[in-house]
Each structure stands twice: as structure tokens, then as C-alpha cells.
Image: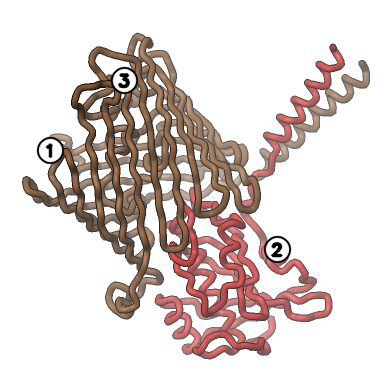
Chain colours: A brown, B red
């Protein structure tokens, strides 16, 4: 008995000492930073031809401590004048408290970690101008919510990495739509419509640099009475080798019935591209003073099935996009693409995006 | 039964301790540790200042397609216990998306990259460029190698700018060492020459 008490006490003391040592590391206040990204688009079809001042996103961050990071994004859409179709919204505002690389506590308005594109949605990061139908109706980017969770990554070997994020959030609210999917179910940031909390998470495994596979899950009650549940399941794969890349995502939504609203929907997209820079463009203005300008030709096919539970004719839009972009540097891109829609007019899209 | 309970409590506290006390990544890798990592056989390091001539700057700006503003670089020369030169290392501070990334590139006596180590990473995201699975891509690259991000070098999603920055820095370091060793505009010398420049 005495021996057991001694061992127990030693274990507690050891864990406390090592914990304190870990906490004692770091201790530096850091920098404050303002940045963001911006894009302007041009869209031309049979019924419209317009320049669109789509996004101006301000990013504010502060490394308050080597283990504490604050980050926020404010998005101004269409000029931000709400009397003229503009929007101003906080896309994310959170604080990270780092325990170690494998465990970082995040609290605030978070970008929901479902799939890839909802997180990696910045205009200067994406190769194409328009997001996919999957990202419009099924995983409604940009999807943000308020809550708390933990994220981190573990190095399984010199090559393999495991990433995870899991959050407890207020959750989606409203009603699924056969024309808009779950897009209008994105929550406000003031109050939850019920006492139920949603759980969402993504687990991604990368066996080596250039290949990542992820799976995402969401579950929660979406009605005020907490009687109707909704769950989502998604898979994503991203591959890159030399100048070639490919990314694809698929997700399914299942919801308890609410009137005539759909109870099942799904969507996917597959995208690929090739990066190059022809030698005959060297020593031209496209290359001058830029250390690594590139062109990327790309293509994407996607569709959304907005009510797979119904036998009636419903909206199942399909879209194919082909195009090319030019990046004088990593954070600046000129894009041009042709978008073919089976449920809407075909359009030519052009855009400029810059991260700063 | 009580004995098993105590053993379980002991195990639980040790597990929690290990989890919480898992080392917080070292944001700062000193110059000494970085060069030791790249050249594990070293026992001593000599430092020489390489003052850039107009021709050196022109060579580097042509190589990198961007102006060079530095007037000198300090070259670290690791040596083994027989006092033989193992290679040459350069510490660079290259601008990432918002802040400089400090990293060391080591070049072997064969003119090929021996290793790369990120010493200080200041960005809020993108720290995966410090990982071996990214940095190992640069091993054995030479001045003649094409180092185009997203073409010859696989960049990291979510750390694109940092990936481009490190790739640019490796190319720069190869050019600096080449010029330091007296190489001309036609590529790296086939045999290592005596280092030039004053000893510090």
C-alpha cells in the first residue's frame, strides 16, 4: 500500500513537473499584422455582361504570445454598401491556445473544417474564379460558425502526417432546400436556434508530400424544437506531382424530414490542372523581375443533387469549367475560364485576385 | 482490485503528463544546431565573409530574375576531425508572405545541396515548410537543377508562399556558393576551389 502511494505520488509529481516545463517554454509577444485578399471579376453571358467587385477581405492577426494567436477576417462583398447589394461580415475571428503541435485549442468564429475548399477558399489560392456547385449548395462556402474545438497535426514519420480538427458549434439552422441545398442554413453568430450543439470534424492523412486524403463529418439538430437531425459525410483527395495537380471532394447530407424539404442531397467535383511557363515568354513583361511566374491550365466538373430522396424532377445542376490562369507570383493571379452549365447559361469568367 | 486501481491511476497520470508535456516545437533553431543537422560529421566551423562584386550581383540577379540588394553573405565552412571541408552553408532571411523566414542551406563540396534547415519561422500558418518531407526535395539539387515551385518542387497546400520562398532561397544559396568558390557564369566548378574572401 505504502509503495503504491509512493508510486502514485511520483507519477503525479513527474507529470506536473514536465507540464510546467512545457508551459514555461516560449513567452515572447509577437507581431501584429494586417493583410488579406481582394478579387475583381468579369462575367459575360447571353443575358449579362458585368464587372463584379466581389471581395475585399481584411485579415487581422496578432501573435499575442508564442503560444497564443488571434486571427480575424472581415469580408466586404460587392462594395460593402448594404443598401446596394453589398455585404459586410466577419468570416472568422478566433483565438488559438497552443498546447503543442498536436493539440491547439481554438475558440471563436471558426471556418468549419468540412472538406478542403471551405478552409482553402481564398481567391488568390484557388485556381478558378467560381467555386463549384458542391461548394455552393452542399458544403456552403464560406461556412463559419461559433464554438470551440481543437486542431493539430502529428508527424507519423519523416513523410507521413496526420491532421485533425474537431469542433463543438452552434450548428446549421433553417430548412434544407431543393433549390439552394443547405446554403441558407448557415447560422448567425448571435444566438443558437436551439440548445443542441453540433459536432463537426475532419481527419486527413498524408502518407507523403503531394497526396492527402480526408474525411469529414457533421452532426446536429437543426430545428428550434431539437427534433430534426442533420448529418453530413464527406471525403476529399488532393494529389500533386510536379506540374500536375488534382483535387476532388464528395459530400452527402441527410436530414430528418421537415414538410416537403429534401432529406437527402449530395454533390461532388473533380478538378485538375497543369502548371508551366513557356520559354518563349521569358524576357517578356510576363517574366521580368518575377522569380517564378507560371501559367496553369485547368478543368473542373461538378454536380449537386439537391434532393435524392424525391422521385420528382428536382434540381441537379451540373457544371464544367475549363480555363487558364497566370501567376506572376504566388499570391497574385489572373484567371480566365469558360463555364458550361446545364441548368443556367454558359458564361465566360475572368478575374484578378491578389493576397497581400 | 485496489492494486489494479492504483496502477491504472499511475498510468493515467503518466499518460496525461506525456500528452501535455510533449515538446512544443522549437521555433528557433540556432545556427550551430542547423549546421550540425546538415553536416553531422562537423567538428569545427570557419566563417568567411563573401563581399559581392558587381559581377556576383549580376550573376545572382540573372539566376533569380530579381535584383540582389545584399552586399555580402557570410559563408559557414564546416570541417571534420581531419580538418577537411565538408561543404558550405549560407543563412538566408527571405520574405515569406508577411515576415522573413530564416533558414540555412548547406551545399556539399560536390556543389549539390547537402541539406536545408528552417531556423526561424514567423508566419502564423505554413510552418510545415520546416518538415523533412518538404526540405528533403532539395537534397542533391545543383545549380543546374530546375527549381520551379509547383513544377519541380512540390509545394505545401496552405503554405504556398513559404514553399516558394524556401525554394527561391535554395536556388539563391547555390548561386552564392558557386560564386564564392570562384565559379563563373557557366555553372558550378567541377572541382572545389579554395574559398575566397577574408577570414573572420
Closer mark to the observer between disc 1 and disc 2: 2
Q: What residue sits 27% from the left and 47% below the top?
A: A56
Letter of the chain that mark 3 sits on in the rendering: A
Letter of the chain that mark 2 sits on in the rendering: B
Q: Which residue is mark 1?
A: A84
- Is B37 on the left or on the right of A221, as rendered? right
User: Which one is nearer the viewer's eye here, B134 or A261?
Assistant: A261
Q: Are marks 1 and 2 in contact (CB under 8 Å)?
A: no
The answer to whether residue A254 of the structure is visible from this angle is: yes
- Is B91 on the left or on the right of A323, as rendered? right
Vertical relation: A309 (above or below) B146: above
Q: What residue sits 53% from the left and 66% below the top?
A: B93
Occupied quadrant, residue B18: top right
Q: Furthest-front residue in view?
A: A311
User: Which image quarter holds the N terminus of chain B?
Assistant: top right
Q: What residue sits 63% from the left and 87% below the top?
A: B197
**Same chain, labels 1 and 3:** yes
Letter of the chain that mark 1 sits on in the rendering: A
Vertical relation: A72 (above or below) A307: below
Q: Which residue is mark 2?
A: B37
Q: Which residue is mark 3?
A: A263
Amino acid at each position: 500500500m505504502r509503495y503504491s502511494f509512493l508510486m502514485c505520488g511520483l507519477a503525479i509529481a513527474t507529470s506536473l513537473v514536465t507540464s510546467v516545463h512545457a508551459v514555461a517554454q516560449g513567452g515572447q509577444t509577437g507581431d501584429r499584422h494586417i493583410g488579406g485578399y481582394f478579387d475583381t471579376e468579369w462575367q459575360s453571358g447571353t443575358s449579362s455582361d458585368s464587372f463584379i467587385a466581389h471581395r475585399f477581405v481584411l485579415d487581422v492577426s496578432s501573435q499575442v504570445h508564442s503560444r497564443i494567436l488571434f486571427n480575424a477576417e472581415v469580408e466586404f462583398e460587392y462594395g460593402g454598401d448594404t443598401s446596394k447589394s453589398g455585404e459586410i461580415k466577419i468570416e472568422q475571428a478566433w483565438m488559438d491556445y497552443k498546447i503543442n503541435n498536436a493539440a491547439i485549442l481554438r475558440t471563436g468564429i471558426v471556418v468549419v473544417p468540412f472538406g478542403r475548399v471551405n478552409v482553402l477558399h481564398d481567391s488568390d489560392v484557388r485556381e478558378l474564379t467560381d467555386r463549384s456547385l458542391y461548394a455552393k449548395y452542399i458544403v456552403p462556402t464560406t461556412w463559419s460558425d461559433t464554438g470551440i474545438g481543437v486542431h493539430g497535426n502529428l508527424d507519423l514519420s519523416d513523410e507521413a502526417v496526420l491532421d485533425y480538427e474537431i469542433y463543438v458549434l452552434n450548428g446549421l439552422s433553417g430548412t434544407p432546400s431543393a433549390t439552394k441545398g443547405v446554403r441558407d442554413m448557415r447560422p448567425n453568430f448571435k444566438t443558437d436556434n436551439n440548445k443542441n450543439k453540433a459536432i463537426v470534424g475532419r481527419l486527413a492523412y498524408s502518407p507523403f508530400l503531394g497526396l492527402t486524403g480526408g474525411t469529414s463529418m457533421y452532426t446536429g439538430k437543426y430545428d428550434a424544437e431539437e427534433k430534426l437531425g442533420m448529418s453530413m459525410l464527406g471525403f476529399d483527395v488532393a494529389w500533386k506531382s510536379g506540374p500536375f495537380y488534382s483535387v476532388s471532394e464528395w459530400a452527402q447530407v441527410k436530414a430528418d424530414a421537415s414538410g416537403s424539404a429534401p432529406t437527402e442531397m449530395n454533390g461532388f467535383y473533380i478538378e485538375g490542372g497543369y502548371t508551366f511557363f513557356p520559354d518563349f515568354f521569358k524576357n517578356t513583361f510576363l517574366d521580368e523581375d518575377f522569380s517564378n511566374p507560371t501559367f496553369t491550365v485547368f478543368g473542373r466538373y461538378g454536380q449537386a443533387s439537391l434532393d435524392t430522396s424525391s422521385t420528382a424532377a428536382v434540381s441537379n445542376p451540373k457544371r464544367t469549367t475549363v480555363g487558364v490562369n497566370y501567376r506572376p507570383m504566388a499570391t497574385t493571379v489572373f484567371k480566365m475560364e469558360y463555364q458550361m452549365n446545364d441548368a443556367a447559361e454558359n458564361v465566360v469568367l475572368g478575374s484578378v485576385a491578389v493576397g497581400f | 482490485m485496489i492494486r489494479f486501481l492504483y496502477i491504472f491511476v499511475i498510468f493515467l497520470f503518466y499518460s496525461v503528463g506525456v500528452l501535455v508535456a510533449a515538446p512544443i516545437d522549437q521555433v528557433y533553431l540556432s545556427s550551430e544546431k542547423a549546421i550540425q543537422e546538415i553536416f553531422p560529421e562537423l567538428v569545427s566551423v570557419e566563417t568567411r565573409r563573401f563581399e559581392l562584386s558587381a559581377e556576383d550581383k549580376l550573376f545572382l540577379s540573372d539566376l533569380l530574375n530579381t535584383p540582389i540588394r545584399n552586399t555580402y553573405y557570410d559563408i559557414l565552412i564546416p570541417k571534420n576531425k581531419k580538418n577537411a571541408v565538408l561543404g558550405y552553408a549560407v543563412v538566408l532571411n527571405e520574405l515569406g508572405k508577411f515576415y522573413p523566414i530564416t533558414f540555412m542551406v548547406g551545399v556539399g563540396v560536390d556543389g549539390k545541396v547537402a541539406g536545408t534547415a528552417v531556423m526561424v519561422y514567423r508566419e502564423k500558418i505554413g510552418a510545415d515548410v520546416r518538415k523533412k518531407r518538404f526540405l528533403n526535395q532539395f537534397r542533391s539539387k545543383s545549380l543546374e537543377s530546375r527549381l520551379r515551385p509547383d513544377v519541380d518542387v512540390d509545394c505545401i497546400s496552405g503554405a504556398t508562399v513559404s514553399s516558394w520562398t524556401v525554394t527561391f532561397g535554395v536556388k539563391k544559396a547555390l548561386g552564392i556558393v558557386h560564386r564564392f568558390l570562384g565559379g563563373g557564369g557557366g555553372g558550378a566548378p567541377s572541382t572545389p576551389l579554395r574559398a575566397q574572401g577574408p577570414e573572420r
